[in-house]
Image (cartoon, rainbow, N blue to C red):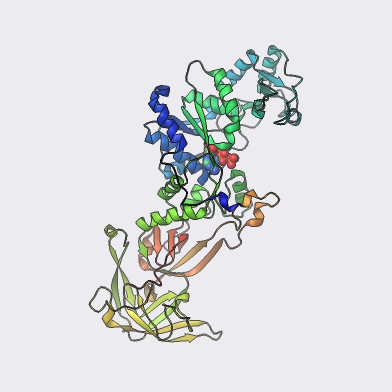
Amino acid sequence: MNEEKINMAEEVKPPVSFIEQIIIDDIEAGKNGGRIHTRFPPEPNGYLHIGHAKAICLDFGMAQKYGGKCNLRFDDTNPVKEDVEYIDSIKEDIKWLGFDWEDREYYASDYFGKLYDFAVDLIKRGLAYIDDQPADIISSQKGTPSQPGIESPYRNRSVSESLSLFERMNKGEFDEGSRVLRAKIDMTSPNMQMRDPIIYRIIKSAHHRTGEIWKVYPMYDFAHGQSDYFEGITHSLCTLEFEVHRPLYDWLVDQLKTNDYRPRQIEFNRLNLTYTMMSKRKLLELVQESKVSGWDDPRMPTLCGLRRRGYTPGSIRKFVDLIGYTKVEAINDVSLLEHAVREDLNICAPRVFAVLNPLKVIITNYPEGKTENVELINNPEDESMGKREIPFSREVFIEQDDFMENPPHKFFRLAPGMEVRLKGAYIVKCTGYKKDESGDIIEIYCNYDPTTKSGESGSERKVKGTLHWVSAPHAVDAEVRLYDRLFNHDDPAGQKDDDYRSFLNPGSLKILKHCKVEPSLVSASPLDKFQFQRLGYFCVDYDSTKEHLVFNRTVSLKDTWAKIHK
Ligand code: ATP
Ligand code: MG
C-alpha cells in the first residue's frame, strides 16, 4: 500500500462535507419543498461492517440533522444469497449504532409488482427487449470504453414478441440464463452501463419474502433508483463505484417520473481500513472456512465483531466523523479507530486491577491472616464514578514482567533491594525471591512500610514505580483474550497475485487462561467495559460466566503509568 494513500488523523477536514453542502443548498433553494429524505439500502447477504457504519452515519445523520427522514430498505433482489439471519443482524446493528428508521422498514421486494409493470411499460414503449443470447455472448458484444458495442440480433424484435416472452419467462417456461430483459438505450454510448444493460433475469429459487411468485428478478440498477422514486427519496447517497451507474439511474427514473421530482444520486468514498478488508463475500469466506470464530469474532471489522471486542457506538461514530466524506478513495489507518475508542473508553470505563501473567509477592512483615480494604478511584476522568474498596493482604499477585532479577538502569519496577508503591496501598521493598528447578522465578519476598498507606499521613513518601496488583486469597481467576490485527499486511485484499489468506496473522489471538482479577469483577455482565490499569481496555465476553470470567482486550493503552511516579 502506498503510504501517501493512508489517511492520517492530521488531515484537514472542511467544516461540512460536500454532501452536507449540497443538502444545505437544496434546502435553501426549496428543492423538493425543502424535504430531506434518505435511505440506507443494505443487501441482506452478510453482516454489516464498519464501512456500512460510514454510510449509516451519513444517511441517518443527515436526515436527523436537517429534520428529514431516513428509510431502511433491504435491497433483496437476489433470492439466492439472502437470508433472514442477515436481516435481523442488520437491524440490531443499526439500532446499536444509535439510529432509528421508525416505521419505515422497506424491502425492494415490496416493489416487485410495480417494477414488473414498469418493465412491461418500457417494452411497450420500445425501450426494452428480450434478448435470447446467453450472458457471455451479451457481454462480449458490449465492446470496450473506446470501442462501440454490437447490437444484439434480438434488439429490434417486435414489442408483442418481447411482451409475450417476458410473461413466459415469469411463468417459469425457460431456464435460468436462457433469456434476459435489456433496456434499449445506446450500444455506442461512451458509458458502458448505457449499452443496453440487463434489467431482468430468470432466477428459479424461492425468495425469502415473496416465495415462488416470481421467476424473473430485477437487477440492482433497475430496482434501486425506482425504489428511491417510489419512496420519495431526495438524496440517494452511495459509494463511488456507483458513479458510472448514475446516467443509467437518471435514465430509468426519467422514464418513470411523472412530475419534477427526481431522487438525486450522490457518491462518496468508501471506508477502507488498514490491516483488514471490507468485502462481505471475503468476510463470509473467513467465517465459512473457520478462519475466525464467526461473524462476531472480535477480530472481524463487522459491527457485531467490534461490539464484542468492546467498541462503543460513540467511538465508531466519532471515527466516521473524523475521516469525513470526500470523492477520493483512500485507506484509513486503523490506529485512528483505536484512538477514537481509547478516547471514549477513557471517559466511561471504570479502572480495575487485573494481572495477566501473575507472579506471587509475599509481604513477609505483614500480619498473617489479616485483610484490610484500600480505597481506589474508579475513574480519575470522572469523579461522579466514585470510589471502590478492594482487599489487601499478605500475599498479592503482580505482573511477571514487573519484576527483574537484574534490572537495567531506569527500570522503575520491582527488583532486589528496590521499592515500589502497590497502587492504592503501601510502598514495598523487595528482600528476596525464589526460583524453581528450571530457574523460573516463582515467588518474590517484600517488606512493606506501614506508614505509607495511600491517602493517610506518610503516604507522601515518593517512589518511582507504581504497580497494579491483586490480593492473592481474594483474586478471581479469569481468561483473557488478547487480539492483534487479523492480517499482517496493511491491504490484504488489495494484492494482485496474492490471496488475502496468505496474510492472515497467526498471532492475532492469544489466550491467557490463568489471569487474576479483583473480586469486584465477578458481578460484571457481557459487554461491560473496564480499563485494566496499566494494560488497556477490556470488555466482558459473551462466553463469560460467574464461574469462568472471560475478557476481551479492546485495545491496549497508549500510555502506562509504570514510569510516571505517583
Ligand atoms: P459487497 O461487499 O457485496 O460489495 P456492499 O458492501 O456494497 O456489498 P451493501 O449491502 O450493498 O453492501 O451496502 C449497503 C450500503 O452501504 C450501500 O449504500 C453501500 O454503498 C454502503 N457501503 C458498503 N460498503 C461501504 C464502505 N466500505 N464504505 C462506505 N459505505 C459502504
Ligand atoms: Mg452493494
Give the x, y percent position of residue 98. 40, 43
Q: Nearer the viewer, residue 34 or 21?
A: 21
Disc tally is 0
Q: Quadrant of ligand 1?
A: top right
Q: Is residue 533 visible?
A: yes
Q: Is residue 103 visible?
A: no
Question: Looking at the picture, does residue 255 appear above or below residue 353?
Answer: above
Q: Nearer the viewer, residue 440 or 81?
A: 440
- The image quadrant of residue 196 is top right
- Residue pictured at 35% horizontal, 56% vertical: 347
- Residue pictured at 75% horizontal, 25% vertical: 133
Give the x, y percent position of residue 147. 73, 28
Give the x, y percent position of residue 4. 57, 51
Q: Is residue 247 left or right of residue 306?
A: right
The quadrant in which the C terminus is found is bottom left
Q: Is residue 14 left or right of residue 334?
A: left
Question: Looking at the picture, does residue 565 appear above or below residue 33?
Answer: below
- Residue pictured at 75% horizontal, 24% vertical: 150
Give the x, y percent position of residue 559. 42, 65
